[in-house]
Amino acid sequence: MSPADTPHVHDPLQPHAHDPNPEPPSPDPSFVFIGPNEEDARITVADLQRLPLTSIPNCYIVSTGHGTSGPFTFGGVTLLDFIQSQIPPTAQWSQVEVISADGFGNRVSIEELLEPDPAGPTLLSYMMDGQAMTRQQGLIRMIVPSEKDDALRQVKWVGKIVVK
Ligand SMILES: Nc1nc2c(c(=O)[nH]1)N[C@H]1C(S)=C(S)[C@@H](COP(=O)(O)O)O[C@H]1N2
Ligand SMILES: [Mo]
């Protein structure tokens, strides 16, 4: 089974109890991007705001611990648009690791990004219900609209994105 067939499997390198961390690990929402040739860059919210805005309505955060919240409309740049803005079109890659500064992570395959679920594309989100997302709410937060029975892929406080 490829990782694309098991979208709810959490990165085994980053085991996570189901209890979400409610507190941001730091005040600064910027993150580090590492491309397929190991080139790195620091990415700010303003950098994401310069890319096309995608909004996805009817998103839920389905916590098996403290219950479901939503629906929310998340806004941001698709993870695919973001990656394509950072790497040359000829670069070879197959997956991306999205890791928060509090040690929570998830892996996304290129297949998931190229053929998004009908629920919507995976997003690097900085807006919630038409307002700027707060750091407390997860800024910058990965939103995976296809995940309906858990929130293990809804990574808050993205700290590092590694394309491999
Ligand atoms: N960085 C980070 N993201 C995280 C978590 C976490 O602990 N740290 N917990 C996950 C889990 S298990 C849940 S249920 C949701 C909770 O999101 P909420 O705090 O917005 O309700 O965040 C997910 N994303
Ligand atoms: Mo959770």
Image (tube, grey):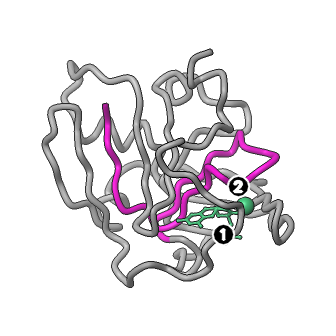
Q: What whole-number distance in Å separates the C-alpha atoms at marks 2 and 1?
A: 9 Å
Closer to viewer: mark 2 or mark 1: 1
For the residue pair 39 and 57, the one nearer the viewer reads as: 39
Horizontal side, residue 8 vs residue 159: left or right: right
Note whether 102 is above or below 81 in the view shown: below
Q: Which mark is residue 79?
A: none
Residue 75 found in image quarter:
bottom right
For the residue pair 63 and 49, the one nearer the viewer reads as: 63
Q: Which mark is residue 151?
A: 2
Magenta stretch bounds: 139-164
State the residue lying farthest toward the top.
1
Q: Is residue 29 magenta?
A: no
Q: Position of residue 3 (x, y in %)?
A: 56, 25
The yes-or-no answer for disc 2 within 8 Å of ligand 1 is: yes
Q: Residue at x 60, y 74 (%)?
A: 21
Horizontal side, residue 108 vs residue 38: left or right: right
For the C terminus, the image quarter is top left
| For marks 2 and 1 on the same chain, the one whose residue lies earlier in the sequence | 1
Q: Position of residue 23 (x, y in %)?
A: 55, 82
Q: Position of residue 145 (x, y in %)?
A: 68, 45
Residue designated by label 1:
20
**Amino acid type of disc 2?**
Ala
Q: Residue at x 41, y 30 (%)?
A: 95
Horizontal side, residue 67 vs residue 137: left or right: right
Q: Position of residue 14 (x, y in %)?
A: 50, 51
* Number of residues whose C-alpha sits closer than 10 Å to that of mark 1, classed few (under 14), some (14–19) or many (20 or more): some
- Circles 2 and 1 in contact, beta carbons < 8 Å: yes
